Amino acid sequence: MAYDAIIVGAGYAGAVSARWLAEDGKTVLVLEKRNHIGGNAYDRMDENGVRRHVYGPHLFHTNSKQAVDFLSRFTDWYPFEHRVLGWIEGQTVPVPFNLTSIEKLFAPEKAEHLKQELIKAYGMECKVPILELRKNEDPEIKELAEYIFEHVFKYYTMKQWGYTAEEIDPAVTARVPVHISYDDRYFQDTYQIMPAEGYTALFEKMLAHENITVRTGVDALDHVCVDTEAKKILFDGEVFAGDLIWTGLVDSLLGYRFGALPYRSLEFDVRTEKAGFQPAVTVNYPTPAEIHPYTRISDYGMMMQTPPAGYTTAACEYPYAYDGNAEKGNVPYYPVFTEDSKAQYSRYARELAKIPNLHLLGRLAEYRYYNMDSMTERALEFCRGLKH
């Protein structure tokens, strides 16, 4: 069969694009290397009756009505406001670090003084990146900033990324700012919801269209070849004139010609626990690796609309440097943003831009981080602008 588009990857970038193009009358082939759809959002029911997010917690939150409206065609939702606690000096306090955190960690008189200083400097309901807070010249605020950096960001960042906070792109630490507020929710977005039947069911419905063919367990590189000099795409040895939307590892498409791009990976120690074994869905451990080698523990049962009463499923999260051939850490999760890696990616992007019907889309292909909502918006925007 001749296809109008080939999409590599059945995560958000690939599935949203496939659905949009199919409804636009295009025939679409989706190739997915894993034996399931949904990318890292894939979930399934386990032996405890818990819907486990196999590749780590996925919490849908957004201010985008466009993203919600599109995805709502394929799922119902239930409200879910995520809360995270951090293990700091022997107790758990809200993360992002906020005014409640200060009250729990400092003596009442000092806590009140520090809160007033922050409010005076930045105002209530303000979110301040930790690197910005550390630049404040007020000695008391600066001292507090150093305390927060030491106990919330420093070791967590080193464990998660393998770099210090100063060595990576400031946008990384800016994702979890200091929140001058009593709002203990991890997110403050308008929509904080979870798919009623899980993410996998959402993807199944999204890809269920007569113009979409999905093949799982298929390595696209066994079928797709790009020739940047001839500016051509080959599919099973024949020139492919349609659109190739590549959502996989961008460096693999060129045989790692400019070297392998760095990613961070994760491994999960999945365990059965008594329901309510920890006080929040997720507890972070921003401690040195010799104290806690993992970064966080999440309770998947607490993410469900009806949490289990007896036993639940939890996962302890261990970061690794990505290595596709390793026993552990062989799934690429997060691009590592350094000046060198960004320059390296630019070389790949420039080379692949020589092929007019090849399109890079998504976290791995564009070498940038996307939340689920922003990836949905990006894919819709891309498809609308695609020239046919």
Image (tube, rainbow, N blue to C red):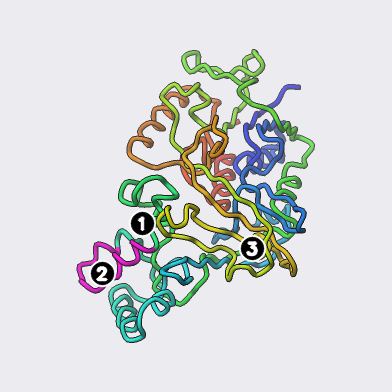
As rendered, which of 232 and 163 lies closer to the eye? 163
What kind of residue is marked 3? Ile
Q: Is residue 82 rendered to the left or right of residue 167? A: right
Mark 3 and 1 residues: CB-CB less than 8 Å, in contact? no
Q: Quadrant of the C terminus?
A: top right
Query: Would residue 296 be found to the left or right of residue 42 on screen?
Result: left
Mark 3 or mark 2, whichever is nearer to me? 2
Q: Residues within 10 Å of mark 3 (few under 14, many from 20)?
A: some
Residue type of the residue flagged with mark 2: Glu
What residue is shown with label 2? 143
Q: Earlier along the polypeptide chain: callout 3 or callout 2?
A: 2
Name the residue nearer the viewer: 88 or 25.
Answer: 88
Q: Quadrant of residue 246?
A: top right
Relative to 201, 225 lies left or right: left
Which x, y percent locates residue 64? 56, 58
Of the numbered discs 3 and 1, the one sitting upstream in the chain is 1
Figure disc tally: 3
Label 1 element class: helix
Tag in front: 3 or 1: 1
Q: On the rendered image, what quadrant is the N terminus found in?
A: top right
Classed neighbour count for the residue bearing mark 2: other residues with Cα under 10 Å, few (<14), some (14–19), many (≥20):
some
Q: Which residue is mark 3?
A: 193
Report if the CB atoms under discs 1 and 2 are less than 8 Å apart: no
Q: CA distance from mark 3 to mark 1?
A: 31 Å
For numbered disc 2, what is the local secondary structure?
A: helix
Q: Find disc 1 in the rendering and name its residue.
A: 154
**Residue drawn at point x = 58 percent, y = 71 percent:** 279
For the residue carrying disc 1, how many other residues have a C-alpha within 10 Å: few (<14), some (14-19), or many (20+)? many
What is the x, y in percent for residue 248?
A: 56, 33
**Magenta-colored span:** 133-151
Q: Position of residue 87 (x, y in %)?
A: 46, 66
Above or below, 361 against 195 in this view is above
